Image (cartoon, rainbow, N blue to C red):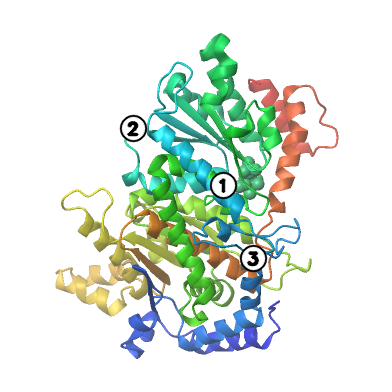
């Protein structure tokens, strides 16, 4: 495990000190081929690292660091089905879900593909029936609304994909996603739906998640009330489940045929490629879903085969390590310039922060360095009119990922060029800024009087040197979206290896869940508050007085 005492880490620190005085302007001035040198293109996807604050030597040393962390070995363990999620004793086999070739995976001895293919076939059959209007509700109506009930990975993955690919969506099906335990989410949606033509997909790997189960049971009551005496026949016509807990789905009232299986070797935040993607298949068709898988598989193959210095997830990960651990960034922004990618920042927040938001290494020891930065973001160009001021002049180091598609997915004349102009302008402005001399000559050229130039000047200077990666997809289609999402998945894995983290557990979410279970009866007035802290006790008392439970 790399720690700050390894020669690779020390060499990076020394090199950082050597080049820390260089501005991105200097790095570009020193190398007329910098763009080409820091560019990787793969199947139409372009990734430009040239506006990151590093040079080739830094990259070489970062690759040394990855080698010190035995990245190649860990990558092989991932793809060979080793139980690398050791704290939960599980393999991490989401690449199997996008294995589209014939043959076994991960190996002939431990082949998961027969089950994976069987579920894919079940998804195809079901989605074609629903999309073709052949799956009928209790009154004989075809399905017009699909509601995915899930949370975390069972919501963010499929929702991000379905919303990103809305240009490919079946015109006869409206897709909805309910996740929040706040009844406002489900209540407002149910008001707009007709139970006779609504299908619920309850997506929960465990089938125990509080939010999902409560929403699913409330939706079930709503449906059963509408079906009246016919409710038992209606239930399996309007509910299907995606879960690894077939018995729990049965207890909910669903026959086995209505359950789409997943396995303990698929982590929640890596599950959109499994039957958790059923709502994706319903929205864009199974062929579209398989295009998505194929994009992801392209990245799997690239990750396995490309040398580290041309390997996209490896480079993205190492650039992130450089920014976090050597330049001291504590945050990282995702800025998609495409309205359809609105949910990508939330998806990446879960992917990155639930995977690597940890301070303890695989060996149980405290990490000797900071791990994942805080991930946040917003679509462009909206963000420009909200928080970009801070990125330009706020004095914080905020590495950014700028993401766009060259072609619009919903074209209107005259929109795409200004969108892309803004997209490219922001990363250039953040990188190169505006010097005092440039600001002064602009003010003078605009005829601003000399005394005002002096007072305005400090406000008109942009320090620049804000690092960013530019990612451009040719189109926001299923294939390239699959590439993009798998790229980030493997980036997270590589960073976990470098930081020495098990990226596939999430014990940090448990304490709050446990406490909520303890507080619920107290809030409902059937449990005591003994042993709770003073603030929580008093807040419970206040809520009981003012709330409606
Ligand atoms: O609470 C965190 C979490 O376990 C996530 O990792 C997961 O994606 C989400 O809850 C939902 O879990 P499930 O699919 O089991 O309902």
Q: Residue furthest top?
A: 229
Mark 3 closeness class: few <14, some 14–19, many ≥20 residues within 10 Å: few
Distance CA(mark 1)–CA(mark 2): 27 Å
Q: Which residue is mark 3?
A: 107
| Vertical comparison of 4 with 94: above or below | below
Of marks 1 and 3, which one's residue comes earlier in the chain? Answer: 3
x and y percent of residue 477 in the render? Answer: 35, 54
The mark closer to the camera, 1 or 2, is 1
Q: Indicate the quadrant where residue 246 lies.
A: top right
Q: Residue at x 53, y 67 (%)?
A: 491
Give left or right: position of 315 versus 440. right
Checking the image for residue 118, the label placed there is 1
**Which quarter of the image is occupied by the C terminus?**
top right
Can you see residue 395?
no
Q: Quadrant of residue 505?
A: bottom right
Q: CA distance from mark 2 to mark 3?
A: 41 Å
Q: Position of residue 474 (x, y in %)?
A: 30, 62
Which of the 4 image quarters holds residue 459? Answer: bottom left
Residue 446 visible (yes or no):
yes
Height in image: 273 above or below 228? below
To which residue does mark 2 refer? 172
Residue 316 location, x and y as percent?
49, 71
Instruction: Using the image as rendered, state which of residue 239 and residue 462 is in the foreground.
Output: 239
């Amino acid at each position: 495990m790399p720690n700050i005492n390894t020669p690779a880490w020390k060499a990076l620190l020394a090199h950082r000190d050597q080049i820390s005085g260089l501005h991105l302007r200097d790095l570009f001035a020193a190398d007329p081929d910098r763009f080409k040198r820091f560019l990787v293109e793969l199947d139409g996807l372009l990734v430009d690292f040239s506006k990151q604050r590093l040079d080739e030597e830094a990259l070489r040393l970062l690759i040394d660091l990855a080698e010190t962390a035995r990245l190649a070995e860990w990558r092989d363990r991932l793809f060979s089905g080793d139980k690398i999620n050791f704290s939960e004793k599980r393999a991490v086999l989401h690449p199997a879900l996008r294995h589209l070739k014939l043959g076994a995976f991960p190996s002939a001895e431990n082949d998961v593909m027969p089950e994976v293919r069987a579920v894919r076939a079940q998804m195809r059959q079901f989605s074609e029936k629903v999309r073709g209007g052949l799956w009928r509700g209790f009154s004989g109506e075809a399905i017009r609304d699909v509601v995915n009930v899930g949370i975390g990975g069972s919501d963010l993955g499929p929702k991000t994909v379905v919303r990103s690919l809305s240009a490919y969506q079946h015109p006869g099906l409206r897709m909805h996603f309910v996740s929040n335990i706040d009844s406002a989410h489900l209540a407002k949606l149910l008001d707009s739906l007709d139970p006779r033509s609504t299908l619920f997909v309850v997506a929960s790997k465990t089938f125990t998640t509080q939010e999902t189960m409560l929403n699913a049971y409330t939706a079930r009551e709503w449906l059963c009330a509408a079906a009246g005496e016919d409710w038992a026949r209606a239930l399996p016509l309007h509910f299907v489940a995606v879960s690894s807990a077939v018995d729990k789905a049965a207890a909910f009232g669903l026959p086995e045929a209505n359950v789409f299986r997943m396995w303990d070797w698929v982590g929640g935040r890596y599950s959109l490629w499994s039957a958790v993607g059923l709502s994706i298949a319903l929205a864009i068709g199974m062929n579209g879903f398989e295009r998505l898988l194929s994009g992801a598989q392209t990245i799997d193959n690239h990750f396995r085969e490309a040398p580290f210095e041309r390997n996209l997830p490896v480079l993205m990960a190492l650039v992130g390590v450089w920014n976090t651990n050597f330049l001291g960034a504590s945050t990282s922004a995702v800025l998609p310039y495409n309205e359809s990618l609105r949910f990508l920042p939330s998806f990446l927040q879960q992917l990155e922060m639930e995977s690597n938001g940890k301070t303890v290494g695989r060996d149980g020891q405290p990490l000797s360095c900071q791990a994942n930065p805080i991930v946040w973001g917003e679509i462009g160009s909206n963000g420009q009119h909200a928080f970009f001021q801070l990125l330009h002049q706020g004095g914080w180091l905020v590495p950014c990922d700028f993401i766009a598609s060259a072609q619009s997915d919903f074209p209107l004349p005259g929109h795409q060029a200004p969108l892309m102009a803004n997209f490219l302008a922001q990363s250039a402005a953040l990188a190169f800024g505006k010097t005092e001399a440039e600001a002064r000559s602009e003010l003078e050229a605009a005829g601003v009087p000399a005394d005002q130039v002096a007072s305005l000047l400090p406000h008109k200077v942009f320090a620049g040197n804000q690092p960013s990666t530019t990612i451009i997809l040719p189109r926001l289609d299923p294939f390239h979206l699959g590439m993009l999402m798998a790229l980030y998945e493997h980036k997270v894995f590589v960073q976990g290896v470098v930081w020495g983290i098990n990226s596939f557990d999430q014990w940090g979410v448990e304490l709050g869940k446990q406490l909520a279970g303890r507080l619920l009866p107290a809030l409902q007035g059937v449990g005591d508050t003994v042993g709770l802290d003073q603030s929580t006790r008093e807040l419970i008392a206040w809520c009981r007085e003012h709330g409606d439970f």
